[in-house]
Amino acid sequence: MKPLGEVAVFLDHLRRPVKSNERNPGPYPYFGANGQQGTIDGFLFDEPLVLLAEDGGHFDNPDRGIAYRISGRTWVNNHAHVLRARAGVDRDYLYRVLENFDARPYLTGSTRAKLTKGSASRFPIPLPPLAEQKRIAAVLDQVDTLRAKRREAITLLDDLAQSIFLDMFGNLPASARLSDLAHVQGGLQLSGTRSSLPCEVPYLRVANVYRGYLQLNEIKKLKATPQEIERTRLETGDLLIVEGHGNPNEIGRAALWDGSIDNCTHQNHLIRIRVDRRHLIPEYLEMYLNSIAGRRHLLGSANTTSGLNTISTGAVKGNPIPVPSMDQQRVFLGRLEQLRRTMRRHRTHLAALDELFVSLQQRAFSGTLWDHDGEAGAA
């Protein structure tokens, strides 16, 4: 183990911020804490480097990454530390060590977390011989490439599903309000006063609901009364809508509940829709609300008071929707299910690759990925 300050040179004195309204677009990428933020007509660096977030990084969720690689002619602002690997240190290996590093014990600042140069310099970096560093980086790069290809395949399948939807229903005008054909329900508010309530149940939160799918690897629990549980208990086919909670990119994110957790409820930042199945198929409504037209209506009804972007239960109830015949919806559902079977296989494989990547990281940086002869250890 060596401190980061001994395995890399900080080039922070060379970086320079430029306000967006003063930045002339050009051929060179302009980087900040979390990646490229645009282009510029000049450059400050021209070599392979590692950038490490200084402030504004994903420090509370390092799985999203707090470091990344750059090369060629680039410009970096003052929100990212600029690191040049020293002799005997592989740049790609250094990036992989720092990519998901848990920097929380090293942060300062009460309102905005900041990773100072002095604190970052103390990061403990495992440093095997250079040849081994390169082998470790190559293995992690290979797995990461597979992960990227799976994500690309999932995106293409989702795009295809949207194309089928638009081909079938893109010109259909809105003919009803959502409340005419569904029951719309808010969720349970989280608070410290719940600790004395008699029942404990699992609940879904914003982090579990994405556009068209659920992420259920972390399910939390809360205390509630039997009446609250009865009112908010989810049923298979319920549609969950993200109210936004300040983030315009999250507004209206919709996914169907799959019934995989018994007695599951939902928090108040998720709005539940339970459709009248005589008139609507839940999968059709999910696809509509995640479509460009559906998202436009939800965004148009968002509350922007005090800078927040949220949609209310009342706004969802009043959302206009097109209502095709049940025969048309069933045809669409059949086509959608074919795509989603393939998509589920891709998501399962991606989850396995994510687990493999984390395992390889842990083994690599603890010295167990390679045996004493420099060959790959047993998988």
Image: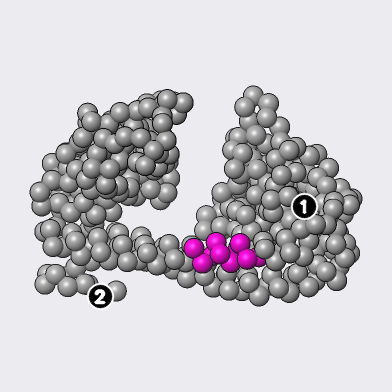
Image quarter for residue 370? bottom left
Inspect the image, locate mark 2, and give the three-letter code of the amino acid beneath it: Ala
Query: Dominant secondary structure of the magenta stretch?
Result: helix
Question: Along the horizontal axis of the image, is 112 left or right of 142?
Answer: right
Front residue (pair 37, 230):
37
> From the viewer's perspective, is residue 295 above or below residue 75?
below
Q: As rendered, which of 372 and 336 lies closer to the eye? A: 336
Left or right side of 276 for 121: left
Residue 340 vertical position relative to residue 313 in the rendered view, above or below:
below
Left or right of 166? Residue 137 is left
At a point 11% along the width and 59% down the height, the residue shown is 129
Give the residue at x 66% y 75%. 338
Front-most of 359 and 47?
47
Residue 324 visible within the image? yes
Q: Residue at x 23, y 42 (%)?
A: 46
Residue 230 location, x and y as percent?
A: 77, 52
> Residue under circle 1?
273
Query: Magenta residues, as a range?
Result: 152-161
Mark 2, secondary structure of its residue = loop
Q: In which quarter of the view is residue 4 placed?
A: top left
Q: How crowded is mark 1: few (under 14 residues within 10 Å), some or many (20 or more)?
A: many
Residue at 63 percent across and 30 percent down: it is 308
Where in the figure is residue 244, as x and y percent of width and height?
A: 64, 40
Residue type at mark 1 is Ile
Give the residue number, with chain letter if any, for mark 2: 378
Name the spot of residue 257 as percent of width and height, x first: 68, 60
